[in-house]
């Protein structure tokens, strides 16, 4: 396993992180498998574990905290997030100072920890002044309850620039990280967000790097969905919306490149994201230990330039630029 700094900070995280968004805690055997994945990830060198207060109503934080308690605190990095409702009260959601302060205590209690390494704003809160949110997060750093903070994709490039002005004006602790969705089929952060992050030294920790399973190569054009796959049961149908003929044709071509490089589609997709130095870690979800072991092979896997050029032709992405005259 290789490690990278989170932005310009001194914090080092494994190139592959394990997230808890899709962790299934709905039964004894499923919980056992989920625990095995976390422990095997740790034993394989993964030191970054991502979570959120809203995952399974706080149960995901308790589950992850129970497992990590068996390991030295200095040996892992754990994150959580704040925004979504944790109760029915008017102040039980959002990014107000009140909710952030109350929610960090709730998360720390769930984890059984004294501090979190990374703390993200899960969404953007239009009802709270940005200055209030940033001051609250900076104060949590000063109090030692969190070490670094970041935001989600919803903040966008313009909001990141506005946040930086506020941070500079009031000499607040800096923003360290952003967690956007980013994968071969969704490259919107390359239009502006990547440039902003590189300018200010903000690390990127993408989620959904395999496009919810599309980029594993298990879905084939004209064939039934694999039994038990996310496309057969996921309530919000996000993966189903990605399973277009155009995308499946691209995956088929990309799979051939992976095979020529002696690897598989999942490893290629993860290594492709890690081609950018500003990416600190890629957050994966693994429902089985064998999925985990396969994905870990992406750390340190270098895609040759000629293959990268061929991938660009297949993906057909163009960065937005407006020319006048």
Image (cartoon, rainbow, N blue to C red):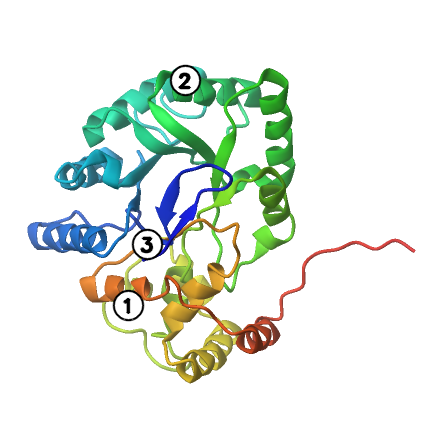
Image quadrant in which the N terminus is located: bottom left
Q: Which mark is on residue 142? A: 2
Nearest to the observer: residue 13 or residue 224: 13
SS under mark 3: loop
Mark closer to the observer (1, 2):
2
Which badge, 1 or 2, is on the more N-terminal residue?
Answer: 2
Residue at (46, 21) in percent of width and height:
138
User: Crowding near pointer 1: few (<14 within 10 Å), some, many (20+)?
Assistant: some
Q: How far apart are marks 2 and 3 (CA)?
A: 41 Å
Residue at (30, 55) in percent of width and height:
285
- Quadrant housing residue 142: top left
Which badge, 1 or 3, is on the more N-terminal residue?
Answer: 3
Nearest to the observer: residue 299 or residue 105: 299
**Residue with the mark numbered 3:** 235
Residue at (60, 45) in percent of width and height:
198
Relative image position of residue 308 (x, y in whole percent) = 55, 72
Relative image position of residue 260 (x, y in whole percent) = 43, 84
SS under mark 1: helix
Relative image position of residue 269 (x, y in whole percent) = 43, 67
Relative image position of residue 316 (x, y in whole percent) = 62, 71
């Amino acid at each position: 396993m290789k490690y990278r700094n989170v932005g310009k900070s001194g914090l080092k995280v494994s190139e592959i992180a394990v997230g808890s968004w899709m962790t299934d805690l709905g039964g004894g055997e499923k919980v056992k498998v989920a625990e095995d994945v976390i422990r095997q990830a740790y034993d394989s060198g993964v030191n970054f574990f991502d979570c959120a207060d809203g995952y399974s109503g706080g149960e995901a934080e308790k589950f992850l905290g129970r497992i990590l308690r068996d390991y030295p605190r200095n040996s892992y990095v754990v994150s959580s997030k704040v925004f979504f409702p944790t109760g029915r009260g008017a102040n039980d959601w959002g990014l107000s100072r009140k909710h952030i302060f109350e929610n960090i205590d709730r998360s720390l209690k769930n984890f059984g920890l004294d501090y979190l390494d990374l703390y993200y704003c899960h969404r953007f809160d239009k009802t709270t002044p940005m200055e209030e949110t940033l001051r609250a997060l900076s104060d949590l750093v000063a109090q030692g309850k969190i070490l670094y903070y970041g935001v989600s994709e919803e903040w966008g490039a313009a909001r990141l620039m506005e946040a930086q002005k506020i941070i500079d004006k009031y000499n607040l602790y800096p923003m360290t990280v952003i967690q956007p969705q980013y994968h071969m089929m969704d490259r919107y952060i390359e239009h502006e967000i990547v440039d902003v992050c590189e300018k200010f030294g903000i690390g990127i920790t993408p989620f959904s790097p395999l496009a919810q399973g599309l980029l594993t190569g298990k879905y084939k054009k004209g064939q039934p969905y694999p039994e038990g796959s996310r496309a057969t049961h996921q309530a919000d149908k996000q993966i189903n919306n990605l399973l277009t003929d155009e995308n499946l044709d691209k995956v088929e071509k990309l799979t051939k490149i992976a095979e020529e490089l002696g690897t598989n589609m999942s490893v290629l997709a993860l290594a492709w994201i890690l081609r950018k130095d500003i990416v600190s870690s890629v957050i994966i979800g693994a429902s089985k230990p064998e999925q985990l072991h396969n994905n870990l092979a992406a750390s340190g896997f270098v895609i040759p330039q000629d293959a990268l050029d061929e991938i660009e032709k297949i993906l057909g992405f163009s960065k937005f630029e407006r020319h006048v005259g």
